Image: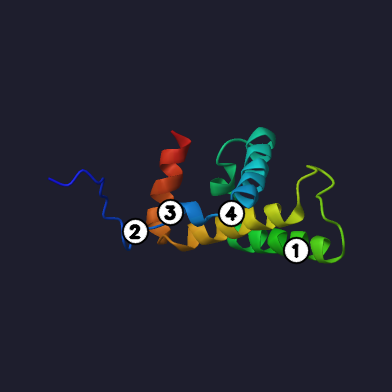
Amino acid sequence: MNDDGRKFDGGKLQYGLIPPAALKETVRVLTAGAVKYDKNNWQKVDDAQSRYFDALHRHLWDWKSGEQYDPETGINHLAHAMCNILFLLERDLYTEKEWEEIVKKTLL
């Protein structure tokens, strides 16, 4: 019998690769949004693709222009941009019908 512990996880997702400080800043933005608007409110926004695309670019351009922190939240513009990318990607991964079901469950 072999006393060495074994775990076969080759080919599995490695969540430990996510940069922790960047993730924390992104979660700070999400938390601020949940307090200001409501938890998961981003899922219910009309014309979300266009609006989050625009918000993404506003934060990127503010950052590129030399403004590191969003004046309203005090959180890095890139963390705000990351949230917008996450919102766009999350919505893009589902069909319209699947998304409607996700939003219905959120409203419960």
Reading the image, the residue beneath label 2 is: 12
Image quarter of residue 63 = bottom right
Q: Indicate whether 14 appears above or below 34.
A: below
Mark nearest the camera among 3 and 1 is 1
Q: Are marks 4 and 2 in contact (CB under 8 Å)?
A: no
Reading the image, the residue beneath label 3 is: 99
Reading the image, the residue beneath label 1 is: 60
Q: Are marks 2 and 1 in contact (CB under 8 Å)?
A: no
The residue that appears at 49% across and 58% down in the rendered structure is: 91
Precedes in sequence: disc 2 or disc 1? 2
Mark nearest the camera among 1 and 4 is 4
Quarter of the image for the C terminus: give it: top left
The residue that appears at 54% across and 54% down in the rendered structure is: 18
Q: Are marks 3 and 1 in contact (CB under 8 Å)?
A: no
Q: Hey, what amino acid is under mark 2?
A: Lys
Other residues around mark 2 within 10 Å, as few (<14) / some (14–19) / many (≥20): few
Across and down, in percent, residue 26 comes to: 64, 48
Question: 36 or 8, which lies in front?
Answer: 8
Precedes in sequence: disc 3 or disc 4? 4
The residue that appears at 42% across and 56% down in the rendered structure is: 14
Q: Hey, what amino acid is under mark 3?
A: Trp
Mark nearest the camera among 3 and 4 is 4
Other residues around mark 3 within 10 Å, as few (<14) / some (14–19) / many (≥20): some
Other residues around mark 4 within 10 Å, as few (<14) / some (14–19) / many (≥20): few
Reading the image, the residue beneath label 4 is: 19
Precedes in sequence: disc 1 or disc 4? 4
Indicate the secondary structure of the residue bearing disc 3: helix
Q: CA distance from mark 3 to mark 4?
A: 28 Å
